[in-house]
Image (cartoon, helix red, strand yellow):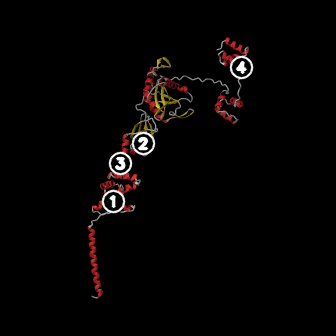
Amino acid sequence: MIDAATEAEILRLFHAEAWPIGTIARQLNLHHSAVERVVRRPHESRPTPVRPMMIDIHRPFIRETLERWPDLTARRLYDMCVDRGFKGSPSHFRNLVSHMRPERVRKPEAFLRLQVSPGEQGQVDWGHFGHVTVGRARRQLLAFVLVLSWSRMIFVRFFLGGPMPSFLKGHVEAFAFFGGVPRTLLYDNLKSAVLERHGDAIRFHPTLLDLAKHYRFKPHPVGVRRGNEKGRVERAIRFLRDSFFAGRQWTDVADLNRQALEWTTSRAADRQWPDDTHRKVREVFEEEKPKLLQLPGDGFPTDFIDSVKIPKTPYARFEGNDYTVPPEFVKRTLTVAVSETEVRLLDGAELVAVHERCYDKGQQIEKDEHLAELRAEKRKAKHSRPTHRLQRAAPSTAQLLEAAGERGENLGTVTAHLLRLLERYGGKRLDGATQTALERGTPHPRSVQMILEVDDRQRGQQPRVDVALPDDPRVRDVTVRSHELAAYDTLRATADDDDDGDATDASHTKEVADGK
């Protein structure tokens, strides 16, 4: 703030001494703008030039249109002006139009204060509290809040996401917490509560109606844009956000819910009752509790139920995670029942598998017994393969196959040759011949075959000849019964006797022909 003496000095130096404004500012240690404000009188102030704007040419049209249709949106006005040559941006246009709308005196709307009796009403809503990262998954953190309208007693339950099972679980735990059920529950237009609404015509979610029938309460949605009708639950969420959640440290959702329960039964219950500041919410709730509807004898199911197709691998997928099932259920459709803590897989009424629920993504949740059964089946199939059957009968063939692979030979052809030798000579002789071939440095099935054939000749056995049969099953499947070799000797003796008889007859015929 420049005092009067300084202002007088500034004016003297400027008008009498003709000092420039910058010189005066430097000598008096002032900012040049402050000196300029003193020097220039109001009528000598520099005029601010008014820059022309693209909207100027359209102002008469906009004013005329707004006088005729005051509620016309800025977006529609923008499109109309674009058709008339306007080339500005929508956001800048919207800002300018907001200052051009005609002033309208709107009568403020008055609301009646809601008056409810004990046990008559409760209000339900979700509170959004950001997101939580679980491994590679990003989950939404929501708080289910139910407030008793008369006593203002609060129930809070945090969930990772707000699907229908969480919505139902919140109701069930809230009713158990209060020890009863209010006769009416007010809902915002939540998708979990209201599927469709046209004016006063409302279509409730069928699962919510099942819950209402079970607990005997009446669901009632508030009016559209009538937040005052459920202001008590909205204030409770704001109170929860400011008094409980802000700055709180917690390890997981279970820990957060434990702290929330402690908060609702202590600080939230000990706050002043708005209708009478001399009383606490806890005291008023004790008066309201007997007026609530009694809880039914059985609970309400809150699990998420769906069907899941098991692929060729024994895993059931849910929320991006894979849960194992016994191998015999591959290529079948099972029922998945998911609670907050576990995932159950059922085949009809039969329980197939139970897993702890995983809130991460891309994980494989496995049971050792499922994988052990699968490994046993795979091991059995593995041993039934030709290579493993060959190696079990003649272990040394594994080294021969390895050498053949190093030479680049066709392992299928080598294995087939060795299998034929196995069927002809047996595993013990094949293993011995293979060892001999390896010791001689000739690891090849033909070398093994030659060793076996030499061994046969040394034993005095005739060489064995492979009989190539066609692929016709009528030939390959024929069973040939062996006969005693003595029968062939009998046939030979009979043939010899027949030959002698034929010779005698021929001699007699010759003698007759000669006239003897």
Q: Which mark is residue 463?
A: none
Mark 1 vs mark 2, foreground winner is 1
- Is residue 120 visible from the viewing direction of this image? no
Which amino acid type corresponds to the residue marked 2 in the rendered image? Tyr
Quadrant including the N terminus? top right
The residue that mark 3 highlights is 380
Tag 1: residue type? Answer: Met
Please indicate, yes or no, whether residue 144 appears anywhere in the rendered image: yes
> Closest to the observer: 198 or 468?
468
Q: Could you classify mark 1 by the number of other residues whose Cα lies within 10 Å: few (under 14), some (14-19), or many (20 or more)?
A: few
Which residue in the structure is indicated by mark 4? Answer: 45
| Mark toward the viewer: 2 or 3 | 3
Choose the circle earlier in sequence order: 2 or 3: 2
Label 1 vs label 2: CA separation? 52 Å
Residue 196 is left or right of residue 31, and the answer is: left
- Element at badge 2? strand
Position in image of residue 313 (x %, y %): 42, 44
Judge depth for marks 3 and 4 and give the one in front: 4
- Distance from disc 2 to disc 4, alpha carbons, whole Å, reads 82 Å
Mark-to-mark CA distance, 3 and 4: 100 Å
Q: Report which quarter residue 64 is drawn in.
A: top right
Mark with earlier residue (3, 4): 4
Q: Dot 4 surroundings within 10 Å: few (below 14), some, or many (20 or more)?
A: few
Residue with the mark numbered 1: 450
- Marks 2 and 3 in Cβ contact (< 8 Å): no
Picture layout, residue 424 above or below residue 516: above
Quarter of the image that includes the C terminus: bottom left
User: How far apart in space, not on screen, are marks 2 and 3 (Cα)?
Assistant: 21 Å
In what element is the residue under mark 3? helix
Mark 2 lies on residue: 315
Q: Closer to the camera: disc 1 or disc 4? A: 1
Report the amino acid beneath label 4: Ser
